[in-house]
């Protein structure tokens, strides 16, 4: 496991423990919004708001941050 994977796993664990929804920037210009369900060795199960449960590899994650509420996005 490289440094990127270690940091990603630590952040995901925090958001899972705190039950905070997140926004993911993923490779190939993709993104996702939702909540972490389970963290494994090199992957995690993500409950995407529209797609449902999805398996994501740590290496696909470019950035992750707390999910802003819709009214926060509109206001700026």
Image (tube, rainbow, N blue to C red):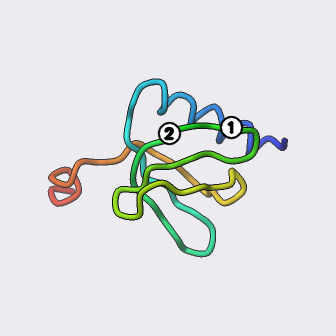
Identify the secondary structure beneath mark 2.
strand
Mark 1, residue position? 7
Question: Above or below — where is 28 with respect to 75?
Answer: below
Q: Earlier in the sequence, mark 1 or mark 2?
A: 1
Q: Residue furthest front?
A: 53
Badge 2, how many Cα within 10 Å: few under 14, some, many 20+? some
On-image quarter of the C terminus: bottom left
In the rendered image, the vertical position of residue 48 relative to residue 51, given as above or below: above
User: Where's residue 31, x and y in %?
Assistant: 48, 65
* Helix, strand or loop under label 1: helix
**Residue under the point 68% across and 47% down:** 43
In the image, 15 versus 51, the foreground residue is 51
- In this view of the protein, which residue sits in the foreground, 29 or 49? 49
Which residue is at the front of the view, 42 or 65?
A: 42
Q: Is residue 58 left or right of residue 72?
A: right
Relative to residue 29, is residue 9 depicted above or below?
A: above
Q: Where is residue 9, by image quadrant?
A: top right
Label 1: few (<14), some (14–19) or many (≥20) C-alpha neighbours in 10 Å: few
For the point 45% across and 60% down, the residue is 32
Whole-percent x, y for residue 68 in the image: 29, 48
Label 1 vs label 2, nearer the camera: 2
* Quadrant showing the N terminus: top right
Position in image of residue 70 (x %, y %): 20, 54
Q: Please give left or right for residue 22 compared with residue 1 in the image.
A: left
Residue at position x 51%, y 49% from top? 46
Q: CA distance from mark 1 to mark 2?
A: 18 Å
Residue 42 found in image quarter: top right
Q: Label 2, on which residue?
A: 37
Residue 2 % position (x, y): 83, 43
Q: Are marks 1 and 2 in contact (CB under 8 Å)?
A: no
């Amino acid at each position: 496991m490289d440094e990127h994977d270690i940091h990603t796993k630590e952040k995901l664990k925090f958001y899972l423990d705190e039950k905070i929804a997140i926004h993911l920037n993923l490779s190939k210009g993709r993104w996702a919004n939702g909540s972490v369900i389970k963290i494994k060795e090199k992957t995690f199960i993500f409950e995407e708001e529209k797609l449902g449960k999805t398996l994501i590899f740590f290496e696909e994650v470019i950035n992750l941050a707390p999910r802003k509420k819709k009214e926060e996005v509109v206001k700026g």
